[in-house]
Image (cartoon, helix red, strand yellow):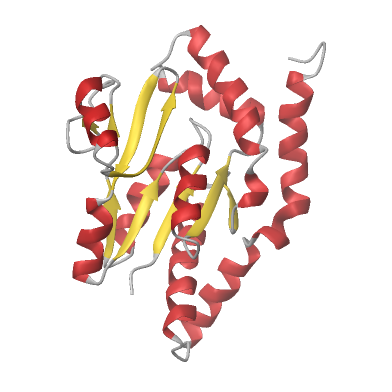
Amino acid sequence: MTTVYIISAPSGSGKSTLVGRVRRLVPHLDFSISYTTRPPRGSEKNGVEYFFVPRIQFEEMVKHDEFLEHAEVFGYCYGTARRFLREAEQKNHDLLLDIDVQGAEQVKRKIADAVSVFILPPDRKELESRLRKRSLDTEEVIQRRLVTASREIENYAKYDYILVNDRLEESIEALRAIFVAERLKRSGAQPSVEETAMLAKAERNRLGNVRERVQPILASFAAATAPGGH
C-alpha cells in the first residue's frame, strides 16, 4: 500500500537539499513535481524542479479537479497533480510531497494517514542568513519570506515529525530514519538491529519528543516580530 509523505518548511530551511539527498537513499519512493505559475528562477528547468505553466492552464486543471492540493503563495499558484499518486499506487511505491502548510492541510483532509514532517531552521537569524546567501530574492521578498516563515512555523504542532535542520548530514539521516521507521511499522515486519536503531532515531524527531527543542526557535521568530524587535 502506498504511503504518502508530506514535507513542509519555511523557504530557506534547506528542504530542497534534504529532499534531494534522501530521495537517492530511499528506494521505491516517488516524488511529486509541483505545478506552478511562477517563472523559473536561476538554473531551474521545466519538469525538474517544477512544471512551469501559464495561469490559464493551471486554472483549467483546478476546474477539472486534477490537483490533490493547490494554493496561491506570493501571487503565484502551486499544485500537486493527482496523477502522481495514481502512478505511485500502480507501482506499489510510496509518494513524497514537498508542499507548504496550506497544501499539507488539504492533503491530510483527503489522506488521513499521510505522514507529515516539518523542517525548521535552527533560528530566525540563520534562516535570514540562508535566504541572503541564495541571492535569489530582493530585500523586500526576503523580509516577506521571513514574515511568512513566522506564520508557517506556528503550524508545527500539526505535523507528525519535526526536524531541525542545523547539521545537514544528521538531518539527512534523521529524515531517512523516518521513512524507514514508517515503512517498518506499516509492514509489521520484525526489525533488524540496524532498523531498530533507525526506529529510535525517528522517534527522537516525533512531535511529542521535540517540543522543548522547538521552543527557542519559535521564540527567536516571536522576538523579531515583537514591537522593537529585529
| 70 sits left or right of 202 in the view | left
- The answer to which quarter of the image holds residue 150 is top right
Q: Residue 45 placed where, x, y %?
A: 18, 30
All told, the count of numbered labels is 0
Relative to 105, is 184 above or below? below
Q: Is residue 52 left or right of residue 207?
A: left
Left or right: residue 186 versus residue 229 is: left
Q: Position of residue 23 (x, y in %)?
A: 32, 56
Picture quadrant of residue 87: bottom left
Asked whether the viewer can see residue 165, the reply is: no
Task: Note whether 156 is above or below 183 in the view shown.
Answer: above
Viewer-proximal residue, 88 or 215? 88
Check the picture and name the quadrant holding the C terminus: top right
| Residue at the image position 59 percent from the left and 29 percent from the top | 149
Q: Does residue 170 appear to the left or right of 78 in the view shown?
A: right
Q: Quadrant of residue 187?
A: bottom left
Residue name at image x 23 percent, y 60 percent: 86
Against 51, residue 197 (above or below) is below
Residue 150 or 14: which is nearer the viewer?
150
Seen at 62% across and 60% down, the residue is 205
The x, y position of residue 33, in whole percent, is: 27, 43
Residue 147 seen in this snapshot:
yes
Toward the viewer: 106 or 35?
106
Q: In the displayed image of the protein, which residue is found farthest to the bottom?
A: 190
Q: For the N terminus, give its image quadrant.
A: bottom left
